[in-house]
Image (spheres, rainbow, N blue to C red):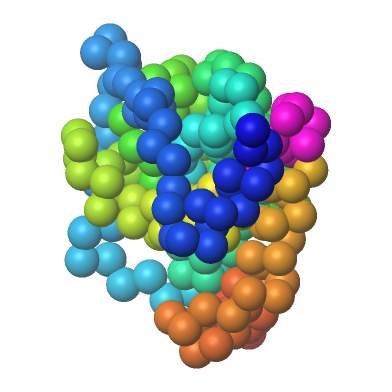
Amino acid sequence: QIGRRKVRRLMRLMGIHALYPKPNTSKPNLAHRIFPYLLKNMVIDHSNQVWCTDITYIPMAKGFVYLCAVIDWHSRKVLAHRVSISMETDFCIDALQEAIVKYGCPEVFNTDQGSQFTSEAFLNELKLRNIRISMDGKGRWRDNVMIERLWRSLKHEEVYLKAYDTVKQAKQSIAEYLDFYNMIRPHSSLNKATPNEFYDQHLLKVMAA
């Protein structure tokens, strides 16, 4: 018999990834208001100009959890994240509130049309702070391409190489990867800077203007 860990190691060496059934993380609520997409043709050139968020599923050895992250569009910096066993709106609000407490408010906040983000509770967090709301077109994942790139990196460099046994292990390992992503991993699109470096550089320009 071959253990699960050996199978994972062999699959990694051969460049093979398991296929998991993907839960629908962007299910709309038809009764909720949908806002227009504001980023088309927008020049995004500084930190805290546009933030975006999304939910993705994280497969485990048995079952899966959900991850919500808030990122700065210009720098790719992950500002806050939460892991949950369910897709309740509260864990998305928690991530948003943490990002605002740490970094202030963006000018524009972009989401997809998932019911968590179109809910009154989530939208009120943005409206109360006079943050402009932008939403992807239905089924247009490219409208939120920056966070889709984060999911791709996270899953291929971290999640698919492991099979988390517990939710606690998933939370810890994902948090460690996102710290690495922000502070150590250089990005070719950022002139080989890290998201933290690029965020700080372009935030200072705004403050000095």
Residue 116's place in the image compared with 51, above or below, is above
Question: Farthest residue toward the top?
Answer: 31
Residue 30: image quadrant is top left
Residue 39 visible, this orientation: yes
Q: Nearer the viewer, residue 78 or 162?
A: 162
Question: Farthest residue toward the bottom?
Answer: 191
Q: Residue at x 50, y 89 (%)?
A: 191
Residue 151's place in the image compared with 135, above or below, is below
Left/right of residue 6 with respect to residue 58 in the rendered view: right
Q: Residue at x 48, y 37 (%)?
A: 56
Find the magenta span and give its range.
161-171
Residue 184: image quadrant is bottom right
Q: Residue at x 73, y 61 (%)?
A: 179
Q: Is residue 167 magenta?
A: yes
Left/right of residue 168 with respect to residue 97 in the rendered view: right
Left/right of residue 120 with respect to residue 137 in the rendered view: right
Q: Nearer the viewer, residue 130 or 31?
A: 31
Q: Residue at x 75, y 27 (%)?
A: 166
Q: Quadrant of the N terminus?
A: top right
Q: Nearer the viewer, residue 91 or 167?
A: 167
Question: Farthest residue toward the front?
Answer: 1
Q: Position of residue 122 (x, y in %)?
A: 51, 26
Residue 133 visible, this orientation: no
Left/right of residue 141 with respect to residue 47 in the rendered view: left
Question: How many numbered circles are shown?
Answer: 0
Q: Is residue 128 magenta?
A: no
Q: Position of residue 123 (x, y in %)?
A: 47, 28
Q: Nearer the viewer, residue 2 or 101?
A: 2
Q: Position of residue 26 (x, y in %)?
A: 35, 28
Q: Position of residue 205 (x, y in %)?
A: 58, 84
